[in-house]
């Protein structure tokens, strides 16, 4: 029982840790996903802020510049080149790519650039060309840029840095995504792709909106965890109480056995004294005394068996030794051949190459004796018992006890190993027994790390085998 309680405790604790771990993992993934979504929104906001900045700067350039700028670029998905023209104020006549000033305005400077951008498509062609013109006609002011972006993004904006790389950046990308323990992210936004320039912007991902959005999920997870811990605590409390009750039961049984042994021994002594007196075998008192003696023996046997079962439940360590199993089985066979109530025929088939066996000698002999006792008890007036002992292919020792008794029905073959269970198929329910024999066999075999097998057919007999491993 203590072993099973420890196993239940271990499983309960492992299950609680597993469930708490799964809850934590689920919450972590939920927060990470929410931060990823927030990061995407921040990247879109950063891109839109830079587009707005470049649009405003470009409008200012067209209003104030006195330089006509023509930029032509070749893209991979367009047969004709794309051209963007920036005309100064009051200069909007362009013929053949040449900017002409209106009469009376004066001369206008003109610049032309041509780029081969066939490594990319023209989705952002006019935007990047306009950006290039804007960047050429103005001197980039970092302080002005930071002020403008700060007004657009608010407290989420931390800072920005111009980066010139070896490859052109055409789409916004997240360089460093936010994490649960690091709430900042780094976004790289195209700024002047033609000249390999981009803007790296560091932004803050606030946790408060994420936590507010997950509030009910976190409350639910916390409640489930608390309920689990309370259930585990209650389970442990009940199991401790059950253990205490089992201890009280065990102590009571031990005390009862101890207290009953004295009056039983006294009763047996008195019966022996009276039986020693010379009386007529047909005398009624003699028959009564014989009955009393037999019942006293039965009661003594019950107490001994009950004591053995209680000790087996408490997992008293086995005394594993090497002993002569052949001689021990021969002695048992000789004892059961002397049965006075029935005609008992016992045969022994010993097929092992060695007489030695590893195990608890007394307990294993009690097991075989229980099996033979059941064979005598639940058979007819003529009992045929066959005891066999042999080695298995795995080096184990198999001991089998077969009989010609009443047999056990298939639906009861598993239940007979339960303590205090007695089959309803027995023809004589007054037959002595309290249903502990096979449960004791089961416990001792399991304690040895072995296994049991049963083959039985109603009205034809039963064969029970135990297999005991042999450890060197």
Image (cartoon, helix red, strand yellow):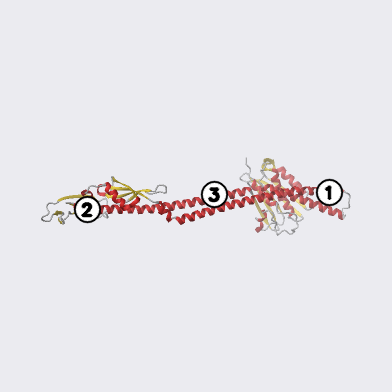
Residue 424 spot, x, y in % from top left = 70, 59
Residue 315 spot, x, y in % from top left = 66, 46
Q: Nearer the viewer, residue 76 or 245?
A: 245
Q: Nearer the viewer, residue 365 or 404?
A: 365
Considering only order in the chain, which callout, 3 or 1, is on the residue closer to the N terminus? 3
The numbered mark at residue 60 is 2
The numbered mark at residue 14 is 3
- Residue underneath mark 1: 270
Q: Secondary structure at mark 2?
A: helix
Residue 7 in the figure: left or right of residue 28: right
Q: Residue at x 47, y 51 (%)?
A: 25
> Would you say residue 169 is visible in this rendering?
no
Of circles 2 and 1, the one toward us is 2
Residue 82 in the figure: left or right of residue 31: left
- Using the numbered discs, state the Cα–Cα distance from disc 2 to disc 3 in whole angstroms: 68 Å
> Would you say residue 25 is visible in this rendering?
yes
């Amino acid at each position: 029982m203590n072993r099973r309680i420890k196993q239940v405790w271990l499983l309960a604790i492992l299950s609680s840790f597993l469930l708490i771990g799964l809850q934590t993992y689920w919450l972590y993934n939920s927060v990470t996903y929410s931060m990823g979504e927030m990061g995407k929104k921040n990247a879109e906001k950063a891109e839109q802020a830079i587009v707005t900045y470049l649009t405003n700067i470009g409008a200012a350039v067209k209003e104030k510049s006195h330089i006509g700028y023509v930029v032509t670029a070749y893209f991979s998905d367009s047969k004709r080149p794309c051209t963007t023209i920036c005309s100064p104020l009051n200069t909007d006549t362009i013929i053949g790519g040449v900017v002409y000033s209106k009469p009376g305005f004066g001369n206008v400077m003109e610049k032309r650039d041509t780029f081969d951008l066939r490594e990319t498509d023209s989705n952002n062609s006019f935007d990047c060309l306009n950006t290039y013109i804007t960047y050429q006609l103005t001197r980039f002011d970092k302080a002005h840029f930071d002020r403008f972006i700060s007004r657009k993004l608010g407290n989420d904006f931390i800072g920005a840095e111009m980066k010139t790389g070896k490859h052109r950046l055409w789409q916004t990308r997240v360089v460093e995504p936010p994490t649960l323990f690091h709430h900042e992210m780094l976004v790289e936004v195209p700024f002047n792709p033609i000249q390999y320039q981009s803007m790296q912007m560091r932004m803050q991902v606030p946790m408060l909106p994420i936590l507010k959005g997950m509030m009910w999920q976190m409350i639910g997870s916390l409640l489930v965890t608390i309920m689990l811990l309370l259930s585990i605590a209650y389970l442990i409390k009940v199991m401790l109480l059950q253990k205490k009750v089992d201890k009280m039961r065990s102590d009571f049984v031990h005390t009862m056995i101890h207290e009953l042994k004295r009056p039983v021994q006294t009763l047996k002594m008195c019966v022996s004294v009276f039986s020693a007196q010379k009386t007529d075998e047909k005398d009624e008192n003699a028959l009564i005394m014989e009955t009393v003696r037999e019942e006293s023996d039965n009661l003594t046997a019950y107490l001994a068996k009950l004591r053995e079962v209680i000790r087996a439940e408490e997992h008293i360590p086995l005394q594993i030794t090497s002993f002569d199993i052949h001689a021990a089985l021969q002695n048992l066979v000789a004892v059961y051949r002397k049965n006075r109530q029935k005609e008992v025929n016992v045969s022994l088939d010993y097929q092992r190459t060695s007489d030695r066996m590893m195990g608890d000698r007394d307990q294993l002999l009690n097991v075989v004796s229980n099996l033979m006792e059941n064979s005598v008890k639940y058979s007819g007036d003529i009992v045929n018992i066959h005891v066999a002992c042999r080695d298995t292919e795995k080096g184990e020792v198999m001991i089998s006890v077969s009989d010609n008794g009443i047999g056990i029905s298939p639906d009861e073959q598993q239940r007979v190993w339960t303590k205090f269970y007695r089959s309803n198929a027995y023809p004589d329910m007054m037959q002595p027994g309290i249903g502990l024999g096979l449960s004791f066999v089961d416990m001792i075999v399991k304690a040895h790390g072995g296994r049991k097998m049963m083959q039985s057919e109603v009205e034809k007999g039963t064969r029970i085998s135990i297999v005991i491993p042999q450890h060197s």
